[in-house]
Amino acid sequence: EKDERRRVEKYFTFIQSLPKINRSTLEALLQHLYRIQQCSHLNQMQSEKLASVFSSCLFQTRGPTPQEISVVLDLINNYITLFNVNEDQVQQMERE
């Protein structure tokens, strides 16, 4: 899907269909990766690097593919939308 908005809608629908434990695990992981990339000015770990490193783990493949990296990049960059994170939570993450 070329349109990011439509991709995010599809990710959201898929994530909502996951069992609660899987959804919570994915949320915790993506929150962590989102927070890491928020500090990329200090740690040099932009979301692109994180997506490259973690994509093969999430998809359980032998190495990252461009498609997997693209999906993980979208998930990290759209964490706030995908998990309905409210403004107070976003501000709290920024303070930490």
Image: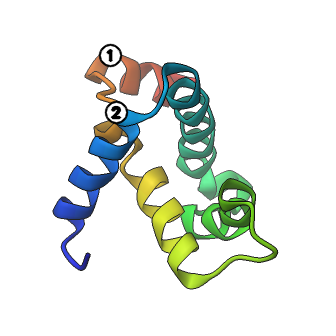
Among the two numbered marks 2 and 1 on one chain, the one whose residue lies closer to the N terminus:
2
Q: How far across and down, in percent of the image, does residue 18 sit?
A: 45, 33
Q: Residue at x 33, y 40 (%)?
A: 82
Give the residue pinned by disc 1. Answer: 88
Secondary structure beneath disc 1? helix
Please, is residue 53 above or below residue 58 in the view?
A: below
Q: Residue furthest right?
A: 62
Q: How far across and down, in percent of the image, does residue 2 sit?
A: 23, 79
Q: Tag count in the figure?
A: 2
Residue type at mark 1: give it.
Answer: Asp
Disc number placed over residue 16 in the picture, else none = 2
Q: Where is residue 25, by image quadrant?
A: top right
Q: Where is residue 47, by image quadrant?
A: bottom right
Residue 91 left/right relative to 47: left
> Gap between marks 2 and 1, in whole Å?
22 Å
Q: How far across and down, in percent of the image, does residue 35 sit?
A: 57, 39
Please, is residue 8 above or below residue 71 in the view?
A: above
Residue 16 left/right relative to 43: left
Q: Residue furthest bottom?
A: 66
Q: Residue at x 21, y 51 (%)?
A: 9
Q: Where is residue 13, by image quadrant?
A: top left
Here the colouring is: rainbow
Residue type at mark 2: give it.
Answer: Gln
Disc number placed over residue 32 in the picture, else none = none
Q: Residue at x 51, y 78 (%)?
A: 67
Residue 13 left/right relative to 26: left
Task: Specify the quadrant that holds the C terminus.
Answer: top right
| 10 and 42: which is toward the camera | 10
